[in-house]
Amino acid sequence: MSTTGTPPLLRATGLLKRFGGLTVVDDVSLDIGRGEVVSIIGPNGSGKTTSLNIITGVLRANAGTVELDGQRISGRKPHEIARLGLTRTFQNGRVIGNLTVADNVLVGLEPAQTVGRPFARLRGIPGLRWFPLLAETMSALIPGAARRRQDRDDEERVTAELDRFGSRLAPRRGDYAYSLSYANRRRTEIARALVSRPQLLVLDEPTAGMNQTETTEVLQQLLALKAAGQTILLVEHKLDLVMTLSDRVLVLDDGRVIAEGTPDEVRRNPRVIEAYLGKAFAEGADT
């Protein structure tokens, strides 16, 4: 149960991931309530991104379950999980360089689109998968009223997300993504993850490579999302950002949870201090 006292939006239980003989995630569990911001921190190699990859369907766990809004999503493919309302960014940037900024954001709406994807259920049936592809092509070439309404709605959503980042992205909507600065590529990825209005937004080091000014800008945008009720699961190395933004923090070390609590509780935990700064420093902090 989350700190909000209501059933959690996300529940991960007993996650275990091995690569050969190496255990990377070892019995990790977490709950996230609606409207909460929960961060996962830990030293390099502690299992943070692997945990996110299990939750979002990029990796299959050796054991454990993940539920979103009471529905089991363990074993589902990433695009299926995205359709259920969980979207993400990645630790390594994944903008599409030869698409415009606006089109990169528009890609994020694909899981939510239904009008332009007729007979989608037939895609998985051998011998019939050509039919929905043909129907989708015809819908794009000769759009009906429903398709035109969807296209207008998609355009409004993309504009709203670019406007969220103000002068950083809005004036560059027609620019190719390869021409963007590194920070603006990261902003484009966040906009793409947000455009479908997900139940849960998963961010993997969203400010990696940004300077202090850029990081502060993104923090203010994330605080605005939090104030609007957006549920967020965050992995981030910049502890000042984590402590400012988070309701709760989960700390991993060597694939295991070593602490969990509010930012103040976690920052004072000797095991956390030891994981980051060494045993001698932790013993000094505890005296």
Image: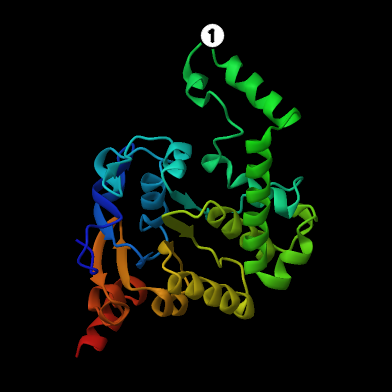
Q: Would you say 24 lies left or right of 186 here?
A: left
Q: Quadrant of residue 200?
A: bottom left
**Camera-side residue: 102 or 211?**
102
Which element carries disc 1, helix, strand or loop? Answer: loop
**Camera-side residue: 76 or 212?**
76
Q: Which quadrant holds the N terminus?
A: bottom left
Q: In this view, does 226 lie above or below 120?
A: below
Residue 256 at x, y percent in the picture: 26, 57
Q: Which quadrant holds the C terminus?
A: bottom left
**Camera-side residue: 35 or 30?**
35
Q: Is residue 95 visible?
A: no
Residue 59 at x, y percent in the picture: 40, 40
Residue 181 at x, y percent in the picture: 73, 64
Crowd around label 1: few <14 · some 14–19 · many ≥20 (10 Å): few
Q: Would you say 201 lies left or right of 139 here?
A: left
Q: Which residue lies furthest to the front in this view?
A: 145
Q: In this view, does 214 lie above or below 73?
A: below
Residue in view at x 58 percent, y 75 percent:
215
Residue under circle 1? 127
Q: Would you say 1 lies left or right of 253 here?
A: left
The amino acid at mark 1 is: Gly
Q: Which colour scheme is used?
A: rainbow
**Camera-side residue: 18 or 198?**
198
Q: Quadrant of residue 202?
A: bottom left
Residue in view at x 43 percent, y 64 percent:
230
Q: Is residue 279 visible?
A: yes
Q: In which quarter of the image is residue 142?
A: top right
Residue 74 at x, y percent in the picture: 31, 39
Residue in view at x 58 percent, y 46 percent:
109
Q: Residue furthest top?
A: 127
Residue in view at x 56 percent, y 65 percent:
208
